[in-house]
Amino acid sequence: MVEDMQGKEIEESNDPLAAEIRDTDIVFDCPHCGKNLVIDYRGAGLQINCSDCGESVLVPIPEGMELHDLDLDVGEVLKQLFATRKNFQKAELEIQSLKARLVQLKEALTVMQEVVAEGLK
Ligand SMILES: [Zn+2]
């Protein structure tokens, strides 16, 4: 059981919006490393980087809260948009390199299967 241990590990994230935990803050776990993250409600639905593992994380939108309830200013949204685009490009590059790796592995597998087939003759 890890109930209380994690609750106590709540720390400030690097986001200046999340200086302290308030009623309006969103508290959630990083889907990558499980770290407790705290962010101002205005961060709902936005992409942030986990303060622990650095992975990009989508801030959950609390029940009953609509995105248009948020009074985000345009500058903030643009900043977020650019960050999301950058993360998207990074992910695309990772996909490309994983695809290349997959091709290599498939080739290696084919060669190995041929060797095994030869050996069994
Ligand atoms: Zn994390």
Image (tube, rainbow, N blue to C red):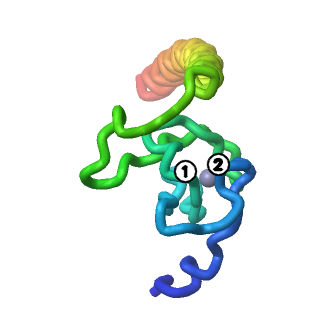
Q: Earlier in the sequence, mark 2 or mark 1?
A: 1
Q: Is residue 94 visible?
A: no
- Considering depth in this image, is 111 or 31 the residue closer to the camera? 31
Which residue is found at the position 60% from the left and 19% from the top? 78
Q: Amino acid at mark 1?
A: His
Q: Quadrant of residue 11?
A: bottom right
* 104, above or below 14, in the image: above
Q: Is residue 92 visible?
A: yes
What label does residue 50 carry, if any?
2
Q: Quadrant of residue 68?
A: top left
Find out if the beta carbon at label 1 lies less than 8 Å from the nearest ligand 1 atom.
Answer: yes
Find out if the beta carbon at label 2 lies less than 8 Å from the nearest ligand 1 atom.
Answer: yes
- Left-right relation of 76 to 16: left
- Considering depth in this image, is 29 or 11 the residue closer to the camera? 11
Callout 2 touching callout 1 (CB < 8 Å): yes
- Considering depth in this image, is 42 or 83 the residue closer to the camera? 42
Q: Amino acid at mark 2?
A: Cys
What label does residue 32 carry, if any?
1
Which residue is found at the position 50% from the left and 36% from the top? 46
Residue 33 is situated, as x and y percent measured from the top left of the image, at 58, 57
Q: Quadrant of the N terminus?
A: bottom left
Which residue is found at the position 58% from the left and 16% from the top? 85
